[in-house]
Image (tube, rainbow, N blue to C red):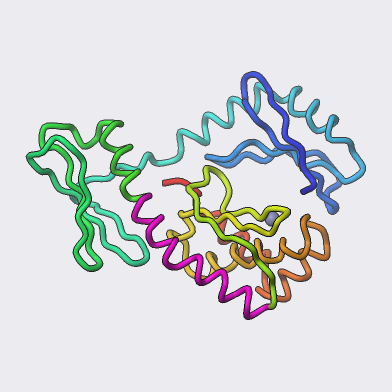
Amino acid sequence: MNSKTYTIANIGSIEVCKHHSTKKLTIKLKPGSIPKVVIPKLMTYEMGYRFALEKENWIVKHNKKLEERIPKTIFNEENGFETRFHKISIQTHLKNSIELKRYNDSITIYYPATSNIASTAVQEKIKNSITEVLRFEAKKHLIPRTFELAQKYNFTVNKIFVKNLKSRWGSCSAQNNINLNVHLMRLPEDLSDFIILHELCHTVHKNHGSHFHSLLNKLVGNEKELNKELKKYNTQL
Ligand SMILES: [Zn+2]
């Protein structure tokens, strides 16, 4: 990939990416993602890094503002949660543990009546339970779907794994093993297919060069539009 990762003390990781159509340095911030510095192709990564260093205070300040704007998801009895194949509801029980019970397409998460549902500990556990449901669905759905699309478009894929990835929707290794984020199950099917096809194209082209984009565009028709749509979703709950 045409990017390099650096670390800046007050920010953490930043990514410097080369972009062929840009003429100036820009900083891109997105809540939940690491800051990106986009630089013209002819500049060195080092120049992008130094630019980010100069703008360190600005990045810290605006990143904080963006993070504050993300609504902190509160899972509770009233809201519940819907995955592609399951309706999840939340209830208290008299036991001291968090438990999951499944009945057809309904899943109930039980939490101790003595604990506060808004507490970080309970919210984290509910989140983990929902992620487990997503993982279950992802294994059942995404893996066969990837093989199906590979066969349809003549890609050779090795192994497919579903993982709870922090900031990426998927990746493809040099050995053509594909990792897919379990949170793809929260996306509409066309966007989930789009990510799968993106990774399948990496079995042929290992970078994001023009050959990669023209192949992907041939398969999905409107990569730009789909990428724009994808920006509305977060890789984490
Ligand atoms: Zn890629």
Instruction: Give the image location of residue 83, x and y in percent.
Output: 35, 61
Instruction: Give the image location of residue 33, x and y in percent.
Output: 58, 40
Residue 38 belongs to magenta span:
no
Q: Is residue 29 above or below residue 176?
A: above
Q: Is residue 65 left or right of residue 133?
A: right
Range shown magenta: 131-153
Front position in the image: 65 or 172: 172
**Residue 10 location, quadrant:** top right
> What residue do we see at 22% from left, 63% from top?
106
> What residue do we see at 76% from left, 22% from top?
54
> What residue do we see at 54% from left, 66% from top?
191
> What residue do we see at 14% from left, 35% from top?
96
Q: Is residue 203 left or right of residue 166?
A: right
Q: Is residue 96 left or right of residue 55?
A: left
Direction left: furthest residue: 94
Instruction: Give the image location of residue 75, x and y in percent.
Output: 27, 45
